[in-house]
Amino acid sequence: MAQLLVGTLIGRLPTGMAPLAILLSAGHGAGFGTSAGLLAAVYLVANAIGGPCYARLVDQYGQRRTLTAGAALSGTAFLALATGPTEAWWAMAAVVVAGVTRPPLDPALRTLWGAGGMMPSPAHQRVALALDSATEELIYVVGPLLVATIATATSASGALVATAAVGAIGTALFVCTPASRAVGANSAARQPDWLGPIRSQSLRVLYAGMACVGVTIGALTPLAVQSADQFDAPQLSGGLPATLSIGAVLGGLAYGARAWRGSAGRHLIVLSAGFAVGWLPMIVAESPATTLYSAAIPGLAMAPLLGAAFVMTSTFAPAGHATEAHALLVAALDIGCAIGTAAAGITQTQLLLPAGAAAGALILGTARRRLHPTFLHSLPPTPDPERAKEPTL
């Protein structure tokens, strides 16, 4: 278990390292001939699109082969970006390959925790997912700091090489664990069901609600810059996201420290409402200090909210599509973050912070029946495409 957790944590560090490493490489003498921001954005979009597709391959062919291949391809692309030609087409191709093939360790780990026998009980699974959501926030703090340190000590290209190396080491540790090796090819995932997890009504509701939550998370970064200008306090631009992450770590630890009454679906609805209300003190704050400290309040609900969403994903994931289902949840959050970042940059209104989360709570609350475990057993079975081909007598 320890090797699994360490491998996942190390292997996910490139998630926080890659965007800044790409920005530094494109903006400090790499001469790619294209904007640094565009390259970083292309990487994130490629990651959001490629994540669910690659996760489907993990479900079909097992974790060891696919994750190892992904780490090799993504790492090679980072090395090509660091040491290859400086033409724009080369840089664009490299970041696309690096993003599309990044091994989906997050969904792979959550799939293992949702598998029978990995966790002693659903309560243990809930605790594990809540703590995982809390520690994931550290990736976005440690990753950029690691890149900045390496780039200062060596070069921006050195930071790209380090990103590739860290991803390879973490993935190797992960796939060498007995739990990961035990996940082999899944014949059920190879059936020609292109909808996959999207076929589940419950997951469609969950993805829509969490995309709205992502709008709030994505809106914070540009609005933090606006608050820094408003209060003439430059520290708020980085301080507000950092404080939110600190609150998320504390909230995840508190949520995982005890058994809470009610189902994960009920937790999801309550926490999404709490996440929305938690932003109100920050948007009415009248001083830099109050604004900074109040950002921790919604953070207290964020990691438990994500943890509950992952539990629901494990509950409703179709057979043979667990990794893909988790990857689609991450993609929904990423898409919401992109929309929130763009909307906040255009509107410059802090009302986006509670509004996005409130929309998510409304979607989840109005469809709460579909988030109850009994709804899973009230649906007709998924049609078997092979049986449909058989002639009817």
Image (spheres, rainbow, N blue to C red):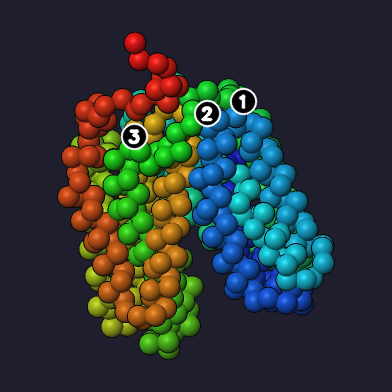
Tell me how far mark 3 sits from mark 1, CA to CA.
24 Å
- Crowdedness of circle 2 by 10 Å Cα count: few (<14), some, many (20+)? some
Mark found first going from the N terminus, 3 or 1: 1
Q: Which mark is residue 227?
A: none
The residue labelled by disc 2 is 190
The residue labelled by disc 1 is 181
- Crowdedness of circle 3 by 10 Å Cα count: few (<14), some, many (20+)? many
Residue 112 seen in the current view: no
Q: Are marks 2 and 1 in contact (CB under 8 Å)?
A: no
Image quarter of the N terminus: top right
Q: Are marks 3 and 1 in contact (CB under 8 Å)?
A: no
Which residue is farthest top?
393
Name the element at disc 3. Answer: helix
Name the element at disc 1. Answer: helix
Q: Residue at x 40, y 16 (%)?
A: 391
What percent of the width, then of the height, locates residue 340? Answer: 39, 68
**Does 237 appear above or below 47?**
below
Residue 94 seen in the current view: yes
Mark found first going from the N terminus, 2 or 1: 1
Name the element at disc 2. Answer: helix
The residue labelled by disc 3 is 316
- Which residue type carries mark 1? Arg
